[in-house]
Structure formats: C-alpha cells, structure tokens
C-alpha cells in the first residue's frame, strides 16, 4: 500500500489550482449560456459515474433548488439518479446505454448535456455524447487531463490537469459552483433587461394565449 504523507492531498490540490484558474473562464460562458437555455424553456441533462455522479447531482440540485439567493426553479436532471431507469436500461441494453437512452428520452434540440469524468474515457458517457449530438444538443464536458475521448467528443470541455482523481473531482466541484455563480448573475441580468421567457416550441410565453 502506498503511504501518503500528511498534507500531500492539499499539496496536490495547490499544485493543480493555478492551471485550473487559467482555464476556468469557460465556466463563465457556460453559466451565461445555460441561463439563456433554461430561461427559454430548455433543459440541462447531467451524468457521471461514481464520484462524478455525485458532482453531477450537486449541479442539478443547485439549479432546481437554489445556489445562493432565491430565484425560480429550472429544469435540470441528473440521469444516474433514476435508479429504476438506469438498472432497467443496463439490464436490457447494457451499461453502455444507460445515459444515451435517457438522453434520447429527455433531450431536445437546443438542450444541454453536461458530462463529468475524471478519465474522460467512460463508454456510457461517450455514448450519451453521441446521442446528444444526434438530437442537436450542446455537449459540455468536465474531465481530467487532456487529451481524452470525452473532451474530443464534446462541443466544449474543461480539462483539469491533475495526476490524482480526487484532485480532479475537487476542482470539478469548484467548476460546478462557478457555473452556478455565472448562471445566477445572468438570470438576474435577464430580469433587469426584461427578457421574455420562451416556451419549448420557440414562442414567447404570452403568445401561446393570444
């Protein structure tokens, strides 16, 4: 068993943080874009395996609930959280299809699929990315070091350069919170501008009652 020196965990995180800060500006763009998508009736789908599944569910909780201040609820689904669907799909179609089939069921053109993976090589996430692109969804990825297959299969990726999976996951959580901060800022800005929400069919909400 490898012996980890006291404090090495913090040292690993400190070494990875400077490089992360140089790439984390993408979270500002993702949060602002996501505010537009969800305000206009779109949906965020998120998926990951193991610890990354927990990070994914953390993100959806912040959007359906709230991050800091009170605001409306927005549609965000963690695909791994429906255990009946995931186990049924795994049993009938194989583990590789557990996220792709749910993406097919819930995703619509213009929606966003965010995938989290420390390795960037999980077959079930790659299958989901392929399905999302077929539908016409945007695909964003939080991964470990690049190059990796998931980053290559996504429209945009934030790749954390760290040798330890725990460090990657910790910085993924930081990225999740940064996305939420950007999201909330854009939601507030849209309210100030008086932007009208749109329904899923692309019309303004009040037009449906004209």
Image (cartoon, rainbow, N blue to C red):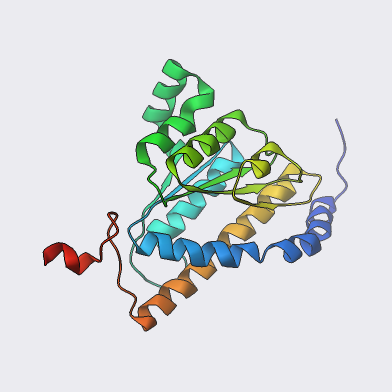
Residue located farthest toward the left when viewing the structure as drawn: 210
Image location (x, y in percent) of residue 1:
85, 30
Vertically, is 102 above or below 29? above
Q: Is residue 185 left or right of residue 146?
A: left
Vertically, is 163 above or below 35? above
Residue 82 seen in the current view? no
Residue located farthest toward the bottom when viewing the structure as drawn: 192
Residue 17 seen in the current view? yes
Q: Is residue 122 left or right of residue 80?
A: right
Q: Residue at x 49, y 26 (%)?
A: 97
Q: Between residues 84 and 26, which one lies in front from this camera angle?
A: 26
Q: Residue at x 43, y 79 (%)?
A: 189
Image location (x, y in percent) of residue 180:
51, 64
Q: Residue at x 47, y 61 (%)?
A: 34
Q: Between residues 118 and 30, which one lies in front from this camera angle?
A: 30
Vertically, is 31 above or below 111? below
Q: Is residue 15 left or right of residue 33?
A: right
Q: Residue at x 34, y 75 (%)?
A: 195
Q: Between residues 26 and 135, which one lies in front from this camera angle?
A: 135
Image location (x, y in percent) of residue 84:
37, 28
**Tally of numbered discs:** 0
Determine which quarter of the picture holds residue 91. Answer: top left
For the C terminus, the quadrant is bottom left
Image location (x, y in percent) of residue 183:
48, 67
């Amino acid at each position: 068993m490898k012996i980890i020196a006291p404090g090495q965990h913090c040292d690993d995180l400190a070494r990875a943080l400077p490089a992360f800060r140089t790439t984390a500006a993408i979270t500002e763009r993702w949060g602002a874009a996501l505010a537009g998508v969800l305000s206009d009736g779109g949906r965020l789908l998120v998926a990951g395996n193991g610890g990354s599944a927990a990070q994914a569910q953390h993100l959806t909780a912040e959007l359906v609930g709230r991050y800091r201040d009170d605001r409306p609820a927005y549609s965000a689904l963690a695909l791994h959280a429906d255990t009946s669907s995931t186990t049924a799909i795994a049993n009938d179609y194989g583990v590789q299809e557990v996220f792709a089939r749910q993406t097919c069921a819930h995703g619509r053109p213009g929606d966003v699929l965010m995938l989290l993976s420390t390795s960037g090589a999980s077959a079930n996430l790659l299958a989901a990315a392929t399905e999302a692109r077929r539908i016409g969804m945007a695909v964003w990825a939080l991964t470990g070091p690049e190059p990796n297959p998931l980053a290559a299969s996504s429209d945009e990726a934030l790749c954390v350069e760290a040798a330890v999976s725990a460090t990657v996951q910790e910085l993924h959580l930081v990225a999740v919170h940064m996305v939420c901060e950007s999201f909330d800022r854009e939601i507030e800005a849209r309210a100030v501008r008086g932007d009208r929400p749109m329904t899923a069919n692309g019309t303004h909400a009040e037009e449906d009652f004209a």
